[in-house]
Amino acid sequence: MSTNVKQITMKAHSAAEVSKHIAGKDDLYYATVRNGYYLPSLKSSIITEDYLADVACGRVLCPRYDEVRLKPCPFPPDKETLLRLAQKIAEHRGKPTGIDDKHTPNRAWLVALVSTYLPGHDIFKKSYVPPPRVVKVADNVQVDYPDDFFEDLPPSRKKGKHRRVGLIAKGKEEAKAERYKRMQDKFKKAYLKAKNDVDAKKHAEKNRIVALSARPSRAQSPRNQHSWNQGASQQAATGSFSTQMMSGGNAPSQQMSQSTTVQNPQSRSPDKSNTAGVGSKRGGGGGNFTGLIHGSNA
């Protein structure tokens, strides 16, 4: 197979142009696919924005659709074997795969990668059978029982998939209990935080109400109080002057007593003043309505 690699010409694009087409990882994934790259599954852990940018810029190994050649492999080997083959291909072609312990592609993509660059591998032969799964040390659990405990015991009659008994899964149960404890601590912290937030809101509302009650009202504000006092002083002065003019210059004690009762000389009834004036003119000094009558009789 030809090892010619398509040359990529780089160009600086503005952020506005990029954001017009790419709003997230999904947009970048499908944009890379539209540009002809055969990517792993979107849900696989290797699919990150950095990996997709490296694929688009040609910095990591990723076949294009026009390069992919699929060979039959109905029973592929385990993922560890396929990852070793992918690393071998990357070393041969001089490009990294972008694969690490936390970021791996799906197994179907690995099979397509090996089929494209190593089509003559044994896994694509008609007679290929994957090797048996290697039992890991963690799966080989040892449980202590008496020597003759399992002697002459019949096998389990339970059909279907056998589940491990509690003693075998003791480590798993301990891990689950530890996980539940962490969840309880997490929920307890969340509850305490929510409770503190509610208490803080209540305290703030209480302080606001206290501040509003301590604030002077509009009628008692210094500015309004000064205006009220000034108006009262002017009104008292006007009433005192009017009383002095009507009394003809009485003693100061009389002026003070009358100033508290007479506040405005114009508040008296105009009808009485007019009537008194008419009586004084027509009655010859009567000064009231009775004088007016006596004058007419005279």
Image (tube, rainbow, N blue to C red):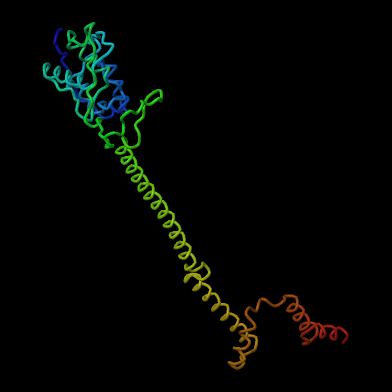
Residue located at (64% from left, 82% from top): 262
Asked if 287 appears above or below 25 in the picture, the reply is below
Asked if 225 appears above or below 285 in the picture, the reply is above
Write down the quadrant of residue 240 in the picture.
Answer: bottom right
User: Which one is nearer the viewer's eye here, 173 or 143?
Assistant: 143
Residue located at (23% from left, 7% from top): 127
Asked if 243 appears above or below 127 in the picture, the reply is below
- Residue at the outermost right position: 297
Q: Is residue 153 visible?
A: yes
State the image coordinates of residue 153 (x, y, percent, origin top left). Answer: 34, 28
- Left or right for 10, reference 166: left
- Left or right for 44, reference 284: left
- The quadrant of the rendering that contains the C terminus is bottom right
Write down the quadrant of residue 19 in the picture.
Answer: top left
- The quadrant of the rendering that contains the N terminus is top left
State the image coordinates of residue 179 (x, y, percent, origin top left). Answer: 33, 42
Asked if 214 appears above or below 112 in the picture, the reply is below
Q: Is residue 21 visible?
A: no
